[in-house]
Image: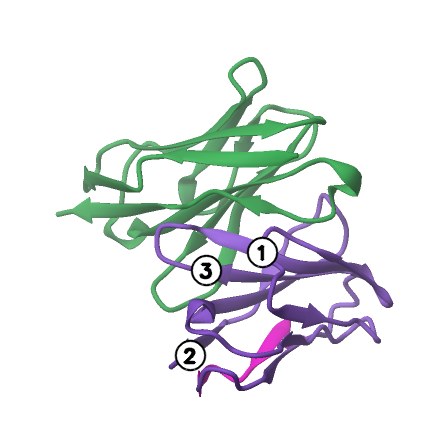
């Protein structure tokens, strides 16, 4: 199993550009989530999904969109990048509510 | 609603000393609680978790945590610190509607002095 994979690992954007962060898992997990990590703030939940076709907002959803058309993939779209979105983004997945959550290696995004 | 408070953003201990990282939570339902560790430039990996049953939970690398409902706490301990324990540690809670997502604390960076 590859586990949770994320692409790209690094990305630099200009303000106003859009892009999609990719996330995939091969463990047949129902739950998938996107977090952003900023110094001193821990991980903050952006969006999550409990299965294909079902998504919901987390703590900091503004400026981000998600969709879940398959169990495996959970892309995160930045609609119009802003400097405040400079962060490290982690995708995670887990089988069920009591199960271990597995994290991807992260995407380091800089918005100029 | 659920939340996690980690007391102390930085903790420094000497090698061989006791490690104590504090975590308090709030949850509207009986919580599921987790500790994760993050080494530099890496993702997070699970140290241990509490869902139901025994309130003292043992994890990897000699860490353990005790769920204390009356104190709404889930502090992480290790009897003897090792240099390799230097990392950032995150407490997380899963509670509320469907336990659908984890809420993380702000993290505690552990330094181990030789």
Q: Earlier in the sequence, mark 3 or mark 1?
A: 3
- Residue pictured at 84% horizontal, 75% vertical: A69
**Identity of the residue drawn at 49% across and 58% down:** B44
Callout in the foreground (3, 2)? 2
The image quarter containing residue B48 is: top right
**Real-space Cα distance between discs 3 and 2?**
15 Å
Disc 3 or disc 1, which is closer to the eye? 1
Q: Is residue A65 left or right of residue B16?
A: right
- The green-tinted chain is B
Furthest residue toward right: A53
Report x, y in % for residue B36. Answer: 49, 49
Q: Residues within 10 Å of mark 2 (few under 14, many from 20)?
A: some
The region drawn magenta spans A1-12
Q: Which mark is residue A111?
A: 2
Q: Chain of mark 1?
A: A
Q: Would you place residue A8 above or below residue B73 in this image?
A: below
- Say left or right for B111 vs A45: left
Chain letter for the part of the structure drawn in purple:
A
The residue labelled by disc 3 is A37
Element type where label 3 sits in the image: strand
Outermost top residue: B70
The furthest residue to the left: B114
Image quarter (top left, top right, bottom left or bottom right) of the C terminus of chain A: bottom left
Chain for disc number 2: A
Q: Tell me which chain the residue with mark 3 is part of.
A: A
Query: Dot 2 lies on which element?
Result: strand
What element does badge 1 sit on?
loop
Asked if residue A39 lies in the magenta stretch, the reply is: no
Q: Separation of disc 3 and disc 1 at Cα?
A: 11 Å
Q: Which residue is mark 1?
A: A60
The answer to which of marks 2 and 1 sits earlier in the sequence is 1
């Amino acid at each position: 199993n590859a586990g949770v994979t994320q692409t790209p690992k690094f990305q630099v954007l200009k303000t106003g550009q859009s892009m999609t962060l990719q996330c995939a898992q091969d463990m047949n997990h129902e739950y998938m989530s996107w977090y952003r990590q900023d110094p001193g703030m821990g991980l903050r939940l952006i969006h999550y999904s409990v299965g294909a076709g079902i998504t919901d907002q987390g703590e900091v959803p503004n400026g981000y969109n998600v969709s879940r058309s398959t169990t495996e993939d959970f892309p995160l779209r930045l609609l119009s990048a802003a400097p405040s979105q400079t962060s490290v983004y982690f995708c995670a997945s887990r089988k069920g509510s009591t199960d271990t959550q597995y994290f991807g290696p992260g995407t380091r995004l800089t918005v100029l | 609603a659920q939340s996690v408070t980690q007391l102390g953003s930085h903790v420094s201990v000497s090698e061989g000393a006791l490690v104590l990282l504090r975590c308090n939570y709030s949850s509207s339902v009986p919580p599921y609680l987790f500790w994760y560790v993050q080494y530099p430039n890496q993702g997070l990996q699970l140290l241990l978790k509490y869902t139901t049953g025994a309130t003292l939970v043992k994890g990897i690398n000699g860490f353990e945590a005790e769920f204390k409902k009356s104190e709404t706490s889930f502090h992480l301990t290790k009897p003897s610190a090792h240099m390799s324990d230097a990392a950032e540690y995150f407490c997380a809670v899963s509670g509320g509607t469907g336990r659908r997502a984890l809420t993380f604390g702000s993290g505690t960076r552990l330094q181990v002095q030789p």
